[in-house]
Image (tube, rainbow, N blue to C red):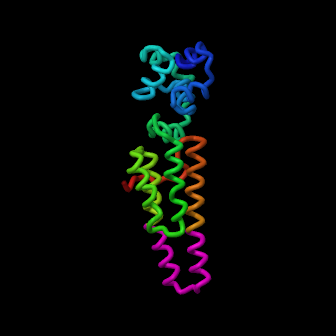
């Protein structure tokens, strides 16, 4: 049993209650209780919320072989900071929907929100990079179909397909942010 879990149970708190009281996500609390060592803001906030010394949360309890290692999924989740406001990240992601049909500007509103809210986490940069990538690739695909002169029906279907694909990517990423606090669709590089 991890130190955080022991202390949390001594305070008669569920993971959800501790998350609400501290402002730290339930997923982060679960990772710490599974053996991930808290750092920085998360460590200070949990220690202050539970009214204990920070060093009390750093004592490892689980043997190394009991700590789960779900490779790719955990690597992606650990990549992002623990103190991200995921509600705001979902709003930034969903802000692309109004302009999903017009790919050249679909990244402007999320970019503006990122700068305005100062949410410059890696996950937000990935959201905007993906929309910039789609803003580049969608007109290219559209122009190729138009230049092939396959008829106005195929041009219209291409435009609808590109729009629906973008909306699907935005909604699927929102679902993953809500459930796993990571992105389902992301680039292997960052444009911004």
- The residue at the point 45 percent across, 40 percent down is 80
170 relative to 139 in the view: left or right: right
Let me know if residue 135 is in the magenta part: no
Q: Name the image quarter holding the N terminus.
A: top right
**At 46% from the left edge and 39% from the top edge, which residue is drawn?**
84
Q: Nearer the viewer, residue 154 or 83?
A: 83
Q: Answer above or below: position of 93 versus 103.
A: above
- Residue 111 lies, with reference to residue 162, above or below; the image says above
- Residue 162, compared with residue 150, is above or below; it is above
Question: Could you tell me residue 187's position as x and y percent?
Answer: 46, 54
As drawn, the residue found furthest toward the front would be 116
| The residue stretch that appears in magenta | 136-162
Residue 185 shows up from this direction: yes
Mainly helix, strand or loop, the magenta region?
helix
Please state the horizontal and vertical placement of residue 103, each as a whole percent of the image: 48, 67
Residue 62 appears in the figure:
no
Q: Residue at x 57, y 41 (%)?
A: 180
Across and down, in percent, residue 114 comes to 42, 50
Q: Residue at x 44, y 37 (%)?
A: 81
């Amino acid at each position: 049993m991890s130190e955080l879990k022991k202390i949390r149970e001594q305070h008669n708190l569920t993971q959800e209650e501790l998350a609400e009281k501290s402002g730290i996500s339930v997923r982060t609390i679960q990772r710490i209780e599974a053996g991930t060592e808290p750092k920085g803001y998360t460590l200070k906030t949990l220690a202050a919320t539970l009214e204990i010394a920070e060093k009390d949360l750093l004592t490892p309890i689980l043997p190394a072989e009991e700590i789960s290692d779900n490779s790719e999924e955990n690597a992606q989740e650990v990549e992002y900071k623990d103190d991200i406001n995921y509600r705001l990240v979902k709003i930034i992601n969903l802000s692309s929907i109004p302009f999903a049909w017009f790919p050249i500007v679909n990244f402007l509103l999320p970019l503006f929100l990122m700068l305005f809210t100062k949410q410059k986490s890696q996950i937000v940069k990935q959201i905007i990079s993906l929309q910039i990538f789609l803003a580049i690739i969608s007109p290219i695909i559209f122009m190729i179909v138009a230049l092939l002169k396959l008829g106005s029906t195929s041009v219209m279907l291409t435009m609808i397909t590109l729009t629906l694909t973008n909306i699907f990517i935005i909604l699927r990423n929102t679902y993953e942010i809500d459930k796993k606090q990571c992105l389902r669709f992301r680039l292997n590089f960052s444009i911004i």
